[in-house]
Image (cartoon, rainbow, N blue to C red):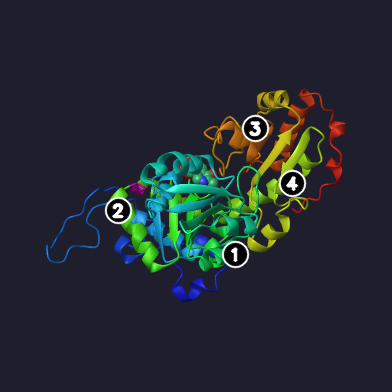
Amino acid sequence: MLKNNQKTHASFGTRLVHAEPVDERHHGALSMPIYQVSTFHQFSLSEPGRYDYSRSGNPTREALEQAIADLEGGYAGFAFSSGMAAISSVFCLFKTDDEILLSDDIYGGTYRAITKLFPRFGIQAKFVNTTDINAVRDAITPATRAVFLESPSNPQMNITDIEAVCRLAKQHNLLTIVDNTFMTPYLQQPLRLGADIVVHSATKYIGGHSDVVGGLVVAAEKELAEEIGFIQNAFGAILGPQDSWLLLRGLKTLKVRMDQHEKSARRIAEWLDNHSAVERVYYPGLAHHPGHELAAVQAAGFGGIISFSLRNVEQVESFLNQITLPAIAVSLGAVESIVTYPARMSHASIPEAKRKQMGVTDTLLRLSVGLEEPDDLIHDFEQAFRCMGFASSDVRTYGNISVSK
Ligand SMILES: *Cc1c(COP(=O)(O)O)cnc(C)c1O
């Protein structure tokens, strides 16, 4: 385990490997034991032990919570039973007549919770293009309490200037909450850009292996952390010890996975960008992406998610029928490549008019680039495009792609 004074010097990849606290209480075990336990013996009524009941605290979950707080640079971390449990628990900070501003292309589940569930408790949502700081400023009213954003957003991969939004939010006494699922703390640390709360669907890159559903929250400051700790215990949507352990394990390989996801994504994005079967590619790593320069400054990488549109709906269907390597599924961030059809899958819970306005058209696909050899993925897409009637010669610059090996 890294001592505190070593942490400030160690590179982030090293910190990921050593994020898990190693402790004499656990005989120095290098992998945190799974405390599969609901309750703890109270040896002394006057001096209860550190843990009493696993909803309130569990050693395995706490190791994960400490690790994510450390990696995001926050005061305290909290693990929840899903990304949505984490996000909904954060929304529980607000009360009747409070208003929250959200990116207008927010994750579908977040959209559902904030437009269908939380209005029952008088909490109102207002959607705004957070990539336009003036639009955010104009949307603030005396009832506004927070700005909730995703950068990159999904599926268009829009980039919001997190630091600028945080500065504006502070001037108006608003909290800034950033869903950092797509970037992970390895590529982006919103608290360092001024955010108050970071949330994650740890189901995605942090877990990384399509085998666990979980959510994480990190609060920058003590007061906010205490409030979220209260909600976590009162509302009770905690992560179990076994799943906490899986996320701890995921963190240890996060760097090597993210490095490869991104390297492959860059290559595949360029390839798709040059293929005439593809109408448009949305990937912040491409120079023509409107958020490219901002992403390059605010994050340490562009991540592994690419969206692209085909030329018509029929082609979407043939493409999905022809590809063999990626799973066709919701979710992302796994070792396997996953192709999602947002209009009918991840964003299906959003009304059609709103969906179109968000840029989720009927021809848009999202690819979470996995850890397969990128050439194998390219060959798979190439054979699918060929079956759809596009010749290999439609690949305009296939030979010119610069690959850094
Ligand atoms: C998947 C996802 C969520 C929801 O997380 P679950 O673990 O599925 O509940 C929230 N935000 C983003 C950006 C996601 O991709």
* Mark 4 within 8 Å of ligand 1, using the beta carbon: no
**Residue 211 appears at what percent x and percent y?**
47, 40
Residue assigned mark 1: 163
Going 55% across and 61% down the picture, which residue do you hit? Answer: 190
* Residue wearing tag 2: 233
User: Crowding near pointer 3: few (<14 within 10 Å), some, many (20+)?
Assistant: some
Please tell me whether the stretch drawn in magenta is mainly helix, strand or loop.
loop
Nearer the N terminus, badge 3 or badge 4? Answer: 4
Q: From mark 4 to mark 1, how far is it between C-alphas?
A: 29 Å
> How packed is label 1: few (under 14 Cα within 10 Å), some, or many (20 or more)?
some
Is 239 on the left or on the right of 395, as rendered? left
Residues in magenta, as a range: 237-241
* Mark 3 or mark 1: whose residue is earlier in sequence: 1
Do callouts 3 and 4 mark residues in contact (Cβ within 8 Å)? no
Residue projecting furthest to the left: 45
Disc 1 residue type? Glu
Instruction: Give the Cα distance between marks 1 and 2.
Output: 31 Å
Type of amino acid at the residue the image marks with label 3: Leu
The residue positioned 12% from the left and 62% from the top of the image is: 45
Name the residue that disc number 4 marks.
267
Marks 3 and 4, how far apart at CA = 17 Å
SS category of the residue bearing label 1? helix
